[in-house]
Image (cartoon, grey):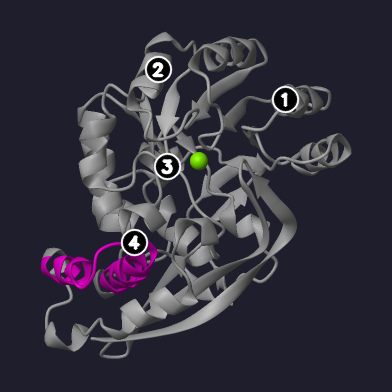
Amino acid sequence: MKLRFRPYTLELKHVFTIANSSRTTTPVVLTEIDYDGILGYGEASMPPYLGESHESATAFLSRVDLSKFENPFELETILEYVDGIAPGNPAAKASVDIALHDLLGKIMNQPWYNIWGYDRKLAPNTSFTIGIDKEDVVRQKTKEAAEFKVLKVKLGRDTDKMMIETIRSVTDKPITADVNQGWKDRSSALEMLHWLKEKGVVMIEQPMPKEQIDNNAWLTERSPIPIFGDEGVQRLPDVKKAHGVYSGINIKLMKSTGMREAHKMLVLARSLGMQVMLGCMTETSCAISAASHLAPMVDFADLDGALLISNDVYDGTKVIDGKITLMERPGIGVKKL
Ligand code: MG
């Protein structure tokens, strides 16, 4: 097996603003694993606030030597080796994991939803994200999102009520909200949650800073809508810690180090009676398609990452009439454009 990789920069269609940052591009690294001429595709997406970069990912990937493994099916051994090369680097690790999954699916000539035993038709609608912006821009973006059945709104600044009321002036679709740790006081947060429920908000992500375990747990116990941990839940060991703190977890391949650990997180969260949401970064259709194989098993999905960019390099899982629609293709189901 041979690993190849190249840095690439995604151009965002709109400036993207969340609770504490704004940007117009996202650095990614595109990977390929070549095994006897069969190619598996992968991707690392690295929004700057998470600490990885073109430099860190390419430095990490230069240290990955897959030539020492003869059997690509030894996922556990291979991925444990990759994980052990250096701490951190979850997106770089995911780019190897995804390419390996794509390769294995192609060798078996089966898509991963089949290998995992999931019905691709059960994949939910994806939400479409509306970033924090001025009233007229929010109204415009809400109108542009006509195809989507669920809207995800970014909150966490002093404009939260304006954001929700502006969307509600255009549509009565269900809204999911993401505070990105932006609320600082639990009592006013709880009041806000009741107000949001009245406005048709159906769930909320990471209301308070991830370090504030007790405050997040206090809110979850009292909240009229489910609360999902996102920044507070990165990898498998975090799932058990999130039990009792959040009602559900937001799984993303770029946090979990890829599909294998994401799948383990999903199974563990379910066994603990927690809800599961599937999220993404701004990514090409490569990483989005990889994540979508878990979509049939989740309560909420936010897989709009490839729709936010103007220079995708893959064709794969699509959003059709608001619904995540997986291709009947082996592996993660992507083709190069
Ligand atoms: Mg989030």
Task: Confirm whether residue 307 shows in the render.
Answer: yes
Residue at 21% in and 85% down: 65
Q: Earlier in the sequence, mark 4 or mark 3?
A: 4
Disc 3 or 1, which lies upstream in sequence?
1
Which residue is labeled 4 in the image? 90
Kindly indicate the quadrant of the structure image that contains residue 56: bottom left
Going by the numbered disc 3, the residue's amino acid type is Glu
Coordinates of residue 250 in the picture (x, y in percent): 41, 39
**Cα–Cα gap, marks 3 and 2:** 16 Å
User: Could you tell me if the residues under marks 3 and 2 are in contact, i.e. CB atoms within 8 Å?
Assistant: no
Q: Position of residue 220 (x, y in %)?
A: 40, 17
Residue under the image location 13 percent in, 63 percent down: 76
| Measured Cα–Cα span from mark 3 to mark 1 | 22 Å
In the image, residue 203 lies at what x, y percent? 51, 24
The part of the image, by quadrant, that contains residue 296 is top left
The residue shown at (13%, 86%) is: 68
Residue matched to label 1: 164
Secondary structure mainly formed by the magenta segment = helix
- Cβ atoms under marks 3 and 1 closer than 8 Å: no
What's the residue type where badge 4 is placed?
Pro
Q: Is mark 1 on a helix, strand or loop?
A: helix
3D distance between C-alphas at marks 2 and 1: 21 Å
Question: Which numbered marker is on residue 26?
Answer: none
Q: Position of residue 113 (x, y in %)?
A: 33, 52
Q: Is mark 3 within 8 Å of ligand 1?
A: yes
